Structures are given as structure tokens and as C-alpha cells.
Image (tube, rainbow, N blue to C red):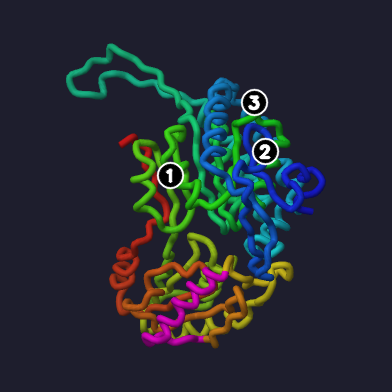
Amino acid sequence: MAGTGVFAEILDGDEYKYYSDGEWKKSSSSITVSIINPTTREEQYKLQACTHEDVNIVLNSAKSAQKSWAKTPLWKRAELLHKAAAILKELEASIAECLVKEIATPAKDAATEVVRSGDLVSYCAEEGVRIMGEGKFLVSDSFPGHERTKYCLTSKIPLGVIFAILPFNYPVNLAVPKIAPALIAGNSIVLKPPTQGAVSALHMVHCFHLAGFPKGLISCITGRTSRIGDFLIKHRGVNCVSFTRGDTFNSIPKEAGLIPLQMEFGGKGACIVLEDADLDLVALNIIKGGFSYCGRWGTAVKVVLIMESIADALVERVKEKVAKLTVGPPENDCDITPVVSESSANFIEGLIVDAREKGATLCQEYRREGNLIWPLLLDNVRQHMRIAWEEPFGPVLSVIRINSVEEGINHCNASNFGLQVVCSQRM
């Protein structure tokens, strides 16, 4: 169970501690943040509300640890990562339990997330040894006016301290692609998990602790992102920011300043269906792409652009499959489970109400109980409706009827969403 057995040291009474300098600690604030179970809508866990003082201590420790870690042989770094991967998979039941209770991940998907996260850590260890073990041989006559009189050997070096902000929808699986590459490359890493999903992340971090990584190399601070996230992004002790969450793509580059950034934001994934498509196959993949994991993933299908001549036939096929989706609590392995919070449910409902008032067709009766929203297909969505452009991040899928492929492409290109951005230069 979560917080018991090998995980007992991360819990103090009913409060989860944060991880710093190889130890589980309580914040200097003496304040906790509540995590609400999306299904029961009652308090499930309590987190430390870390302070700026806590952050400063974490970053000083991370800087010191990184200098020693950069001198650690690649094979040794990989060895520890493989050990962490094995522990992750061994302890998947406790971590999966947290995912179910914190973010309403269906039980079977929660277990799968932890196992594939372990596999990804091992993959990064193996590929990291190959990539970091390679160098390049450069010659000087690639520029006009130069002769081949000089030679140069290059190799990759660590950036330093990496600050990673994690998303709520995959607080484990989208954490390890930040942690493992950073560590194999010789960096230290400071994690800021989402409030909703933090306990899952803390259990994951403990697996790296049990693997025996040096003190200070991995840290995990908790609390409101508005309180400590911005402070960390601006902090001079951070050498790179890796961000996965939401749509705050305008503010982060300004706040981070002259350091490398890797950012993953929201998405408005589109499916364009032309007249020669196999409609049965398309309907099947629309359901998978739009309603798997309750539509709570960045690359999910969120709008279907269908040629008018085949729209009626395809919509009917999709409606039939939507009716077969199971709805209920995550413990029952339902297809559709509660969204992460009341505010998320209210946001989704607002998109639906706006679309309905502006003429969209609801293919099913709109139904909501607490944070649980039944799957809904919206037909005849138009450009002036919010849901044509905004990301619901829930079990709601829009259908826009088009008259040409160019019309569909133009709609996709007009989106404000760009899921991934990498800025590697120091500006």
C-alpha cells in the first residue's frame, strides 16, 4: 500500500514529506497542501508546502551533487538507472494505487503506466551510454578560405541542474523521460510535481532513492506551483528548464531568461477524414484517440474534421461506439473516469454549454455527476465556438464538417497550440 513498507519513511503521520539531499523532510513552512480524490471529492493526501528557503537549500545541494556526478563513469550511471527501473516495476502496485486515488487513472492503466515507466528508464540508460559515449571528429576546411590544417574532437557535456515541472495526467510516465536522460547525461534534477499527482511522483522518486543515487542528485519539492514554480524558473541556480503542463508558453521563456528550455504544452490534435476513408476503421481509431484515458493526454484526438458527404455515416458509427464505453470509478477499470478536479469539470461543462448555445448538436445526453462526465460527441461544431479551439482535456470530442481538405488543414494550422518546443541556444 501507498506510504507503507519500504515507502513508510516518506510519510510523517498523514503528511507526505518532500525529498532533498537524499532525505525525506518536512517543509520549513509547517504548512500542508491537500490533495482531493477526484472520485470521492474528499481529502486523500497532504503534501508539504515548500518555501523559497527550502528551494534554495535544494538547489545548493543539487549543484554540489552534479559536479561529482559528472565525473561518474557512464557505465555506473546506467547501472543505477537500471536498478531504479527494476525497483519501479517491483513496487508498481503502491504507485498505481496513488495514481488511482489522486488523478482517477483506471486501475489497469495505472499499473501499466508504472511498468512502462520502468522500461523507459532502462531504455534511456542504454541509449544514453551509446549517445554520451560518442564523440565527433571535425576538420577545418568546411569553411571557405580554410585548409585542412586543424582538427577537433568534440563530446557532450552536462548542462548542470535541470528543473522539471511535471503534469498531472502522467506524473510518473512523463517524469522519467526528464529524470533518466538528465541523469545519464551527468546532470542533477529538481522535480516539481503537480499538486494533483504529487504523491505518485514522490513514491516514484523513492524508487530512485532506494537504487542508491548520490545525495542531492535527485530532489522533489512539493507545494503550489504559483508559489515555488515561478521562483525556481527564475532561479540563477537552474541551468535548464523542462516543462510539461498547460498553455503558459508565453511566460516561461521570459521568466527563465538565458537558459535552455524544453517545453511541452497542450494540444488540439485533429483527425481529418476524407471521402475514400474506411469509416469503420476511422470510427474505431477516433474512439481510441479521443476517449482513451478519458481524453486526458496531450496528443489525444480532440477535433474530427470530416468531409460533409460522409459526415452523417461516420458520426453514426462513432455514436454507436461511444454508447459502449463504460463509465464509473477508476477502481472498476472503466473507460471513462472522473476528471481530475471540480474546476476541470466546470471548464469542460462551460465548453459544452457554449457549443450547445451556439448551435452544436449533442449526440448524447449531457450528463455529469460531480467530477464524472459521461462521454460526449459534439456534431456541427463551428469556428466561432470555444470548443473548436480550446482543449477540453476530458471525454468530449468535437466534429467539424468541411468541404475540402484545404479547409481542414487551414483549421489545424490556425490553432494556437504547439505541443512541443525546444530552445537549446542561450539567447
Sequence order check, earlier mark of 1 and 3: 3
Q: Where is residue 187 in the image (x, y as percent from the top left)?
A: 53, 31
- Left or right: 85, with 285 as reference point: right
Q: Which of 171 and 421 is in front in this view?
A: 171
Residue assigned mark 1: 262
Residue assigned mark 2: 208
Extreme top residue here?
A: 149
- Left or right: 347, with 120 as reference point: left
- Judge whether 265 appears above or below 426 on screen: below
In the rendering, which numbered label is found on residue 86?
A: none
Measure the alpha-carbon separation of dots 2 and 1.
23 Å
Residue assigned mark 3: 76
Sequence order check, earlier mark of 2 and 1: 2
Extreme left residue here?
A: 145
Looking at the rendering, the stretch of residues picked out in magenta corresponds to 342-363
Q: Where is residue 205 in the image (x, y as percent from the top left)?
A: 65, 42
Q: Does the magenta run of residues contain 348?
A: yes
Measure the alpha-carbon separation of dots 1 and 3.
26 Å
Sequence order check, earlier mark of 2 and 3: 3
- Judge whether 383 appears above or below 330 on screen: below
Q: Which of 196 and 387 is in front in this view?
A: 196
User: Which SS class for mark 2?
Assistant: helix
Most frequent secondary structure within the magenta stretch: helix
In the rendered image, which quarter is residue 141 located in? Answer: top left
In the rendered image, which quarter is residue 21 located in? Answer: top right
Q: Which amino acid does label 3 sit on?
A: Lys
Q: Which amino acid does label 2 sit on?
A: Phe
Q: Which amino acid does label 1 sit on?
A: Gln
User: Which SS class for mark 3?
Assistant: helix
